[in-house]
């Protein structure tokens, strides 16, 4: 079996204080993708770089306290690829790929556009660049899982207040159509939705820190594991872990019938 976890940490140092790393070592996971490190390599304590049985790989943002992605692996990776080959976004630390034989697992942090029109424009630029990258991965013949914070709720069932958010970043028609094109045109599969096609409240992975969003479960599903169809068809179990809070996002755990460690 292959167990893959993805989690936006909203700061690896903050999440580690809240118990994320100790939780991680109790999950029997094989690969753990993390996003929004908000740290550079010198900021990472030894237990963050190599927590327990895991070895960490990181693609940090050049700007301090911003963005950054990582992958923790139990099995040594054959190859690590940082970035998408575009200077603007590679400087923000948004893409890290670990290859294991014919399997690739990617940690992705798609830009948020909620803070300003300029950041929304940057989000659209990234989406335009990333669409052909996804097509290349899909056509590569490899088994691929793209994990991460996509900052898009794909459908109305993926957020609580969908009617009032139709003009807000994360649920814009253009964003939803782009996400749909990955699934409908390129053939990627949303592993969680394959197993839970009608889940609503249980599927949320992010809650605003404003108001009583967490207490009232006014959430959004922004964190996904998007897989090549043959691999997604072997997804056995998927859950959003909410028993402890490590950040404003919750970890997404998916088990695949895959001989990863064999």
Image: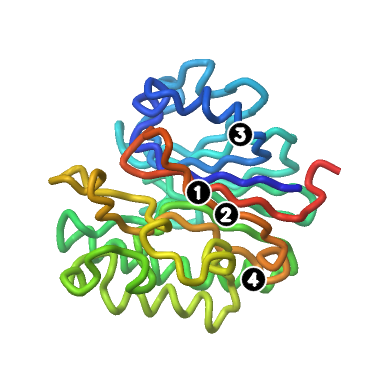
Question: Dot 3 corresponds to which residue?
Answer: 27
Question: Most extreme residue toward the bottom, as rendered?
Answer: 185
Discs 4, 2 touching: Cβ within 8 Å: no
Place of residue 89 in the rendered image (x, y in percent of width and height, measured from the top left): 39, 53
Place of residue 14 in the rendered image (x, y in percent of width and height, measured from the top left): 34, 26
For the residue labelled by badge 4, is the local secondary structure a helix, a strand or a loop?
helix
Which class describes the residues within 10 Å of circle 2: few (<14), some (14-19), or many (20+)? many
Question: Dot 4 corresponds to which residue?
Answer: 138
- Closer to the camera in the image, 222 or 81: 222
Could you say which disc has been placed on residue 29 in the image? Answer: none
Q: Earlier in the sequence, mark 4 or mark 1?
A: 4
Discs 2, 1 touching: Cβ within 8 Å: yes
For the residue labelled by badge 3, is the local secondary structure a helix, a strand or a loop?
loop
Q: Earlier in the sequence, mark 2 or mark 3?
A: 3
- Closer to the camera in the image, 21 or 118: 21
Question: Dot 2 corresponds to which residue?
Answer: 238
| Image-quadrant location for residue 53 | top right
Discs 1, 3 touching: Cβ within 8 Å: no
Disc 4 and disc 2: Cα gap in Å? 22 Å
Question: Dot 1 corresponds to which residue?
Answer: 252
Disc 2 and disc 1: Cα gap in Å? 7 Å
Q: Earlier in the sequence, mark 2 or mark 1?
A: 2
Between label 4 and label 1, give the one nearer the viewer.
Answer: 1
Disc 2 and disc 3: Cα gap in Å? 13 Å
Place of residue 140 in the rendered image (x, y in percent of width and height, measured from the top left): 70, 68
Discs 2, 3 touching: Cβ within 8 Å: no
Q: Residue at x 47, y 52 (%)?
A: 148
Which class describes the residues within 10 Å of circle 4: few (<14), some (14-19), or many (20+)? some
Q: Earlier in the sequence, mark 1 or mark 3?
A: 3
Between label 2 and label 1, give the one nearer the viewer.
Answer: 2
Q: Residue at x 54, y 24 (%)?
A: 49
């Amino acid at each position: 079996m292959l167990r893959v976890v993805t989690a936006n940490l909203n700061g690896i140092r903050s999440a580690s204080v809240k118990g994320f790393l100790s939780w991680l070592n109790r999950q029997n996971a094989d690969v753990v993708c993390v996003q929004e490190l908000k740290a550079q390599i010198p900021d990472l304590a030894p237990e963050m770089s190599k927590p327990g049985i895991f070895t960490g790989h990181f693609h940090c943002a050049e700007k301090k306290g911003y963005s950054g992605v990582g992958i923790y692996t139990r099995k040594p990776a054959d190859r690590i690829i940082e970035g998408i080959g575009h200077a603007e976004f590679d400087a923000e630390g948004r893409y890290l790929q670990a290859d294991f034989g014919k399997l690739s697992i990617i940690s992705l942090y798609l830009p948020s556009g909620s803070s300003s029109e300029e950041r929304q424009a940057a989000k659209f630029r990234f989406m335009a660049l990333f669409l052909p990258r996804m097509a290349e991965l899909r056509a590569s013949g490899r088994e691929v899982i793209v994990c991460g914070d996509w900052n898009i709720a794909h459908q109305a069932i993926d957020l609580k207040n969908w009617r009032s958010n139709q003009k807000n970043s994360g649920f814009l028609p253009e964003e939803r159509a782009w996400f749909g094109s990955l699934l409908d045109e390129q053939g990627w599969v949303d592993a969680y939705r394959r197993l839970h096609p009608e889940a609503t409240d249980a599927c949320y992975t992010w809650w605003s820190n404003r108001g009583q969003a967490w207490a009232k479960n006014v959430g959004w599903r922004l964190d996904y594991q998007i897989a090549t169809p043959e691999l997604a068809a072997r997804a056995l179990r998927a859950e959003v872990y909410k028993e402890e809070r490590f950040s404003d996002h919750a970890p997404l755990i998916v088990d695949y019938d895959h001989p990863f460690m064999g």
